[in-house]
Image: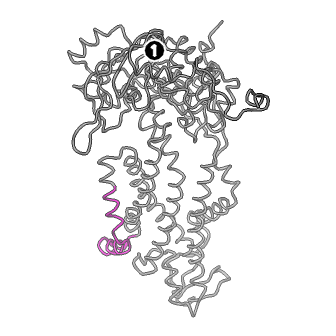
Amino acid sequence: MTDPLAKTPHPEETVVRRGLFRRLLKNPLGVTALIILLVVLVAAIVGDALVPFDPNRADLANAFLPPGGEHLLGTDSAGRDVFARLLAGARITLLAAALAAVVAVAIALPTGLLAGYYTGRFDSVASWFTNVTMALPSIVVLLAVSAALGKSVWITMTALGVLMTPGLFRLTRNTVRAVRNELYVDAARVAGVSTTSIIGRHILTVVRAPAIIQVSVICGISISVQAGLDFLGVGDPLIPSWGLMLNEGFRNIYSAPLLALWPGLAISLTVGAFVLLGNALRDVLEDAQTVKLTKKQRAQRAPMTKPLSLADMEAASEDADHLLVVSGLGVGYPRTDGTIKTVVEDVSFYVDRGEVLGLVGESGSGKSQTAFSILGLLPDEAEIAGGRILFDGVPLVSAAGGRLSESRMSQLRGRRIAYIPQEPMSNLDPNFTIGYQLTRPLVKVLGKSKAEARERALQLLEVVGINDPKRTFDAYPHEISGGMAQRVLIAGAVSCDPDLLIADEPTTALDVTVQAEILDLLRDMQSRFDLGVLLVTHNFGVVADICDRVVVMQTGAVVESGTTSQIIHQPTQPYTKDLLSAMLAGTAPMTTLVPGAGSETEVAK
């Protein structure tokens, strides 16, 4: 029987999805805002061709002409055509708003993403500058800038853009901090996705909706501030703008009240349209069901190039027969008093190709910390207190050299070391389809085309026992069950042909029947791909079902190890015996608390 994974994908396909613009047209408020902004934009672009008058040409003989005739909206106190000045003001207003928004986004968005994702010193410095900027009185600063650098709308709007960055920065930073520790972000890191891609794809997706609203608010505020400054006489009097027209209208409110109506109406409609469009785009992005993927992307597999020390080379030579070697590993966390709290101490074991090793212990025993040490996912404050970890001769962790750099570790994760987390639904990004999340590592890590990645993902979904791969491929995480989600994660873990698979409590959140199916699937995947598997669990029933060897951990240390048969039938340590006695298998079932009809109690009565 031919293995379906051996099929060679053929023609490339393009995933055609519904566009944002089409969904935007279904939103009445969005359509209304779009029409208003398009009218203003067209007026700004072709305004000079619509009227034969120069907006700055004064003709005192025609002052205060009423609307009608060749002057559609009449003239002002200097005889200038109001309609011509309104169209010219639209150009200045839109450009000013765009400049302020671009400056704010260019500064606040990247700094907010980096500060929220990396935290630490950069976050502290960026937050300090943000607080200082927020403490500055904006109007006073703008007046000072105008007085010092001249009455230029472009200089003023650039300064306004800088002053508008704190709101967008804080919004971005706080949103990123809320999702940076989500399990699907860790899952993306383990899959080998680069930090840039994680921020750009997973983090930015969460930020984009509130950021769009904030940018639309910035545009509206910029228009209002620019008009307000011109109204106060701070702007350049030679450049026609809605603020100058509004000033003109208020100075002649009794003799020509309509002069204040037209610029006021234009400002109100434009600001309102920006706010409505931002909300409509937010709704469209939040409700979007698909993403159009068209551009090819390639990624080459980068070899590990970290030089080995003499001690590492000798250790690698000794352990060359093992896929993974953990020797004397110690992990600790600093306390406030300067001491180190050790959570993993002198842990040693190995994993060979083609075997399943169970790492067993109760919660807090240090087994997950050990697994995260191998994956390079320990928190920044964690310290390697001793020992070393070798993967196929490459030192991942050593007490002398610390941890392998994130850039080099990312060359192993997803490519050669895969990870299956617990809580499957939390490890799938709700913003993307199952198919997108399966094909993304294939494209970025293995350099496959979109068509090849799609074909392999469908084959993998079939291999892991999903009856309708196409439907699951197009579904979102909330549309599938927990068991199917775990199968999807297993398919994603083996998609890039890893050598080592780390499964962290892969059946914890599943019911008993689904647990058995997942364990059978794991064993099948291990046999099919000749994987070395490190299974982290607290359940000896799972160990007995799938593991070849067992390592028992208690309070951060190894207390016993051996083959599964030895540990289960001939345990030597009291802790191991306690864990085995906690299993339900082989125990007598409990009787009912309340006797039913026909029970022995009832008969006795």
Q: Residue at x 43, y 31 (%)?
A: 363
Residue 434: where, in percent of width, then height? 60, 33
Left/right of residue 377 with respect to residue 458 in the rendered view: left
Q: Would you name the residue on which mark 1 appears?
A: 532
Q: Residue furthest bottom?
A: 254
Q: In this picture, is 296 found above or below 181?
A: above
Q: Nearer the viewer, residue 278 or 286?
A: 286
Percent from the top left, x then y, of residue 307?
25, 20
- Mark 1 residue type: Gly
Q: Which region shows up in magenta?
A: 127-152
Residue at 55% in and 26% down:
507
**Rendering quarter of residue 235:** bottom left
Question: Looking at the rendering, which quadrant does residue 403 occupy?
Answer: top left
Q: Is residue 171 above or below residue 139?
A: above
Q: Does any portion of residue 482 appear in the rendered image? A: yes
Majority SS type along the magenta span: helix
Which quadrant holds the C terminus? top right
Query: Residue 445, how many percent across, how many down?
Result: 47, 26
Say left or right for 173 vs 54. Answer: left
Is residue 130 a member of the stretch shown in magenta? Answer: yes
601 is higher (above) or lower (below) than 339? above
Q: Nearer the viewer, residue 345 or 124?
A: 345
Circle 1 packing at 10 Å, graded few (<14), some (14-19), many (20+), is: many
Residue 153 percent coordinates (x, y): 41, 69
Asked which secondary structure carries label 1, the reply is strand
Task: Identify which residue is drawn at 50% across, 83% down.
Answer: 58
Q: Is residue 253 magenta?
A: no
| Residue at the extreme front | 605
